[in-house]
Amino acid sequence: METQPLALVTGAAHRLGKAFVLALARNGYAILLHYRTSDVQAQNTATQIRTLGVPVFLSQADLSHPSQISALFSMVDRIPHPLKVLVNSAAIIPSGDARTVSVSDWDAVLNLNLRAPFLCAQEAAKRMKDGGLIVNVTDVGAKKSWSHFPSYSVSKAGLEALTKILARTLAPSIRVNAIAPGLVLQSDLISKEEWDRLVERLPLKRPASVDEIALALDFLLKNEYVTGQTLVIDGGYSLLG
């Protein structure tokens, strides 16, 4: 009997990360659910996963520290399921001004949003002996000049470049792709008025649902001839000037 495959999703306690782990669980994967500080939400998400009849394991780690990434993958080695999928979803999105952002704030964003996915991909590739899929969660903002989010925009643009480099490096056994959501879930960084204004500008006139973003992951799981691509799920946001 073939061993059930394992999927690791970083930042999976809530928001889009939660949608990704639920999509993977519905596809029959055992789940390693990573979170940093959202313990209650992680436990609640794990409970939902168990109702789908698949094993779920939880791991708390601050991925901005390479030693904690190493510890996370040491846990992967102790789980009796072979790693087949990595989704790099953990990220932070602080606002700032390129003229004044500090070195420490800049590094905090790049360390989590760009270096951590790179290190996680390195570790995952070592363990995907019989092939696998790595998915980086980027942002439609990777191709925009968001002056109020300089470090975030740079980190996501870098992650899309990294996706292509890893896709070439790890082929043919491991596929590497990215998903770039547009407006999905309003954050505390933006007012309701600004959110509504942005949504009204969209060609489709509404934000995405988390399930619509998760469907992109379903596609990447099932179509094994796609690698090095960024799937933009943005309701037409990237069409705007």
Image (tube, rainbow, N blue to C red):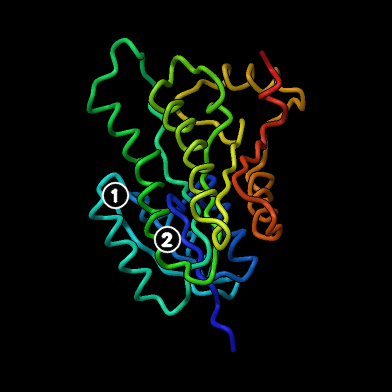
Residue 39 picture quarter: bottom left
What secondary structure is found at the residue carrying circle 1?
Answer: loop
Compared across the picture, whether 151 is left or right of 142 comes to left
- In the displayed image of the protein, which residue is found farthest to the top? 99
**Nearest to viewer (mark 1 / mark 2):** 2
Q: Residue at x 40, y 57 (%)?
A: 34
Compared across the picture, whether 21 is left or right of 203 comes to left
- In the displayed image of the protein, which residue is found farthest to the bottom? 1
Q: Residue at x 33, y 50 (%)?
A: 36
Residue 239 picture quarter: top right
Report which residue position mark 2 lands on. 124
Q: Mark 2 belongs to which amino acid?
A: Ala
What secondary structure is found at the residue carrying circle 2?
Answer: helix
Q: Is residue 85 above or below residue 139?
A: below
Q: Residue at x 34, y 33 (%)?
A: 109
* Residue 203 pos. (x, y %): 76, 23
CB under 8 Å between discs 1 and 2: no
Q: Is residue 5 above or below residue 102?
A: below
* Residue 180 pos. (x, y %): 59, 37
Report which residue position mark 1 lands on. 62
Q: Is residue 73 above or below residue 107?
A: below
* Residue 30 pos. (x, y %): 52, 71
Q: How packed is label 1: few (under 14 Cα within 10 Å), some, or many (20 or more)?
A: some
Q: Which quadrant would the C terminus be assigned to in this image?
A: top right
Q: Residue at x 77, y 27 (%)?
A: 204
Q: Which mark is residue 160?
A: none
Q: How packed is label 2: few (under 14 Cα within 10 Å), some, or many (20 or more)?
A: many
Residue placed most toward the observer, 173 or 212: 173
Whole-number angstrom distance, CA of label 1 to CA of label 2 = 17 Å
Q: Mark 1 belongs to which amino acid?
A: Asp
* Residue 147 pos. (x, y %): 45, 14
- Which mark is first along the chain, 2 or 1? 1
